[in-house]
């Protein structure tokens, strides 16, 4: 540009209408000349009353890289007014000298101003400015560090290759050098976030080295989030590290680890490692484990799924149950869990989930446990019997009847009644079993002849029901029931002898059976007296 033209431009910057002065500043910026007169005019414009002119002049000084303007720019940054961002960015654009001067000045500024400076440097046009902004990640104030990381990460996509390379080199050096161990957790986490935004393959090892439990939570979380941008993890060592992170009680660490593990296809080889996720403190990780591994017929998976059945989260329990039902190994584990269930409610959930045919060996195990619970009056017996009925109802009836009759032969009448009542719950229960229940019930009745006591006696009510079945030979069965003694028969006959119709007739025949069985016994005499008082022909 001719000297006369440049002089005219300088004159326009210093005087004339405001719009022309602004235009002259823009032209001066565009021509890139560092002529002393132009620099002086621009410096003078930085003191003008018009803010827009001041900002345009500051920007122009940075663009033409006028190093002699550095003191003025630093002064404007220190002042902290509306010109701070423009002055900081312009100083950063002066190259390494300007960037270093800003770095030195940062220590003198209050937090709010330092954050503004960082944001401005991140928008700079030189590698030095970018590095100076990155240097702010080492600031002692976490607010400044956060502002620096946010600004740098946001600007990364717009950085030219050279500047990206300079920034990457600086961050890797700080995170890998001897001073890495002296970084605060806030600075280290922020550097990792910015480095992740740069997507440099050389940084992957840095991220993996910072996810172990010895690192601060903020650092681990940032490293895990960074790894999420690098594609599916590879290698069992890295997978083991991710599993350990997923087991962490801090969800900001567990969640990104889970997201990474979601990218890994589950294979039989990985099942033992991934099965550890069933023990995760966070329910979301456990649900993930159920979804990821539920279809594998592996003992570790079955154990892990079974462990979820007592968890407080309903959705997790339901998912685990569904997964267990889908494999033979899972169904076997369900039965083991049912046998070990600590609460009736849990046992019911398991029994309903298992419903279906069981192998004979398993049926016998379940029956043995059910009988133990039943004899101990433990409510966990019911879901076990429920399962057995759905597996083979006929087999279960035979087994219970066999146990009941075996107990009767041992004269354990209370135990016999306890089992026969199970059979009598079935509406299809035959009269022979109902007779056994009624007759054995007589053996444990208190034989109280008071009317109100007899009305409340279950065995007498069961005999009354049997009387209504005309096809059943009730007297014939009584005659064959040799375990019933005269005391039992007298109590039965005494009650029905006071009834009307067929029931009265039945009572008389039972009293006569007492006389036939033991004609010389005291109860035979009582039977004769009762027959006489009730109007029966002797």
Image (tube, grey):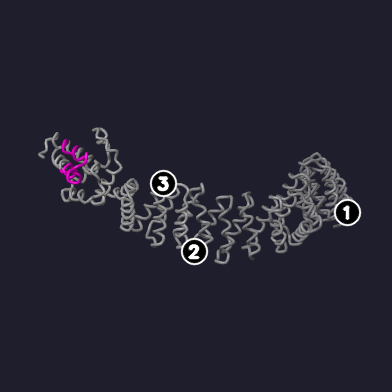
Q: How far apart are marks 1 and 3 (CA)?
A: 104 Å
Decide whether the magenta segment is chiefly helix, strand or loop.
Answer: helix
- If the image is split into quadrants, where does the N terminus sit? bottom right
Label drawn at residue 376: 3
Q: Which of marks 1 and 3 is nearer the N terminus?
A: 1
Query: Which portion, as a residue range, is magenta?
Result: 509-530
> Is residue 523 shown in magenta?
yes
Specify few, some or many for label 3: CA neighbours under 10 Å numbering under 14, 14-19, or 20 or more.
Answer: few
Label drawn at residue 114: none
Q: What element carries label 2?
A: loop
Residue 504, horizontal then vertical, whole percent: 15, 39
Q: Distance between the residues labelled 3 and 2?
A: 35 Å
Which residue is at a point 21% across and 48% down the rendered structure image?
A: 478
Occupied quadrant, residue 462: top left
**In this view, 477 is above or below 229:** above
Residue situated in front as seen by the camera: 58 or 84: 84
Among all residues in the image, which is located at the extreme front? Answer: 520
Label drawn at residue 297: 2
Task: Tell me if I can see residue 158 in this picture.
Answer: no
Q: Is mark 1 on a helix, strand or loop?
A: loop
Q: Name the residue under label 1.
A: 35
């Amino acid at each position: 540009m001719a000297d006369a033209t440049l002089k005219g431009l300088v004159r326009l910057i210093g005087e004339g209408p405001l719009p022309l002065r602004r235009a002259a500043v823009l032209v001066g910026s565009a021509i890139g000349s560092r002529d002393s007169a132009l620099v002086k005019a621009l410096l003078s414009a930085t003191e003008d009353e018009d803010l827009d002119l001041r900002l345009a002049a500051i920007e122009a000084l940075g663009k033409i890289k006028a190093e002699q303007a550095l003191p003025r720019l630093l002064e404007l940054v220190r002042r902290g007014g509306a010109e701070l961002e423009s002055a900081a960015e312009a100083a950063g654009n002066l190259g390494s000298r300007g960037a270093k001067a800003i770095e030195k000045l940062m220590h003198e500024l209050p937090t709010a101003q330092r954050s503004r400076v960082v944001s401005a440097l991140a928008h700079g046009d030189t590698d030095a400015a970018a590095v100076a902004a990155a240097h702010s990640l080492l600031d002692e104030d976490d607010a400044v560090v956060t502002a620096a990381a946010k600004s740098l990460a946001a600007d990364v996509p717009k950085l030219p290759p050279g500047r990206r390379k300079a920034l990457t080199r600086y961050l890797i050096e700080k995170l890998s050098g001897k001073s890495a161990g002296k970084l605060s957790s806030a600075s280290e986490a922020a550097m990792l976030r910015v480095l992740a935004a740069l997507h440099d393959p050389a940084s992957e090892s840095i991220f993996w080295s910072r996810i172990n439990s010895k690192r601060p939570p903020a650092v681990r979380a940032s490293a895990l989030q960074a790894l999420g941008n690098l594609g599916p993890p590879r290698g069992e060592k890295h997978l083991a590290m991710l599993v350990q992170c997923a087991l962490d009680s801090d969800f900001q660490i567990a969640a990104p680890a889970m997201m990474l593990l979601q990218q890994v296809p589950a294979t039989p080889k990985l099942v033992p490692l991934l099965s550890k996720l069933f023990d995760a403190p966070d329910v979301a990780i456990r649900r993930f484990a159920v979804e990821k591994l539920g279809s594998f017929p592996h003992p570790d998976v079955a154990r892990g799924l079974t462990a979820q059945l007592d968890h407080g989260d309903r959705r997790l329990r339901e998912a685990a149950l569904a997964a267990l039902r889908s494999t033979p190994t899972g169904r076997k584990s369900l039965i083991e869990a049912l046998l070990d269930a600590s609460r009736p409610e849990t046992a019911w959930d398991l029994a309903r989930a298992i419903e279906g045919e069981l192998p004979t060996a398993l049926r016998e195990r379940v029956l043995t446990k059910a009988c133990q619970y039943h004899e101990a009056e433990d409510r966990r017996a019911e879901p076990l019997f429920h399962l057995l009925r759905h597996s083979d109802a006929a087999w279960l009836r035979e087994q219970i009847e066999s146990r009941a009759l075996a107990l009767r032969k041992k004269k354990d009448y209370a135990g016999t009644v306890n089992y026969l009542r199970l059979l009598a719950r079935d509406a299809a229960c035959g009269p022979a079993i109902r007779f056994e229940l009624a007759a054995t019930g007589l053996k444990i009745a208190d034989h109280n002849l008071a009317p109100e006591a007899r009305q409340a006696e279950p065995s007498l009510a069961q005999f009354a029901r049997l009387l209504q079945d005309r096809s059943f030979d009730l007297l014939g069965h009584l005659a064959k029931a040799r375990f019933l003694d005269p005391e039992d028969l007298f109590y039965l006959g005494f009650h029905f002898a006071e009834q009307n119709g067929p029931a009265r007739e039945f009572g008389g025949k039972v009293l006569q059976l007492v006389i036939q069985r033991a004609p010389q016994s005291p109860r035979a005499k009582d039977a004769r007296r009762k027959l006489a008082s009730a109007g029966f022909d002797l």
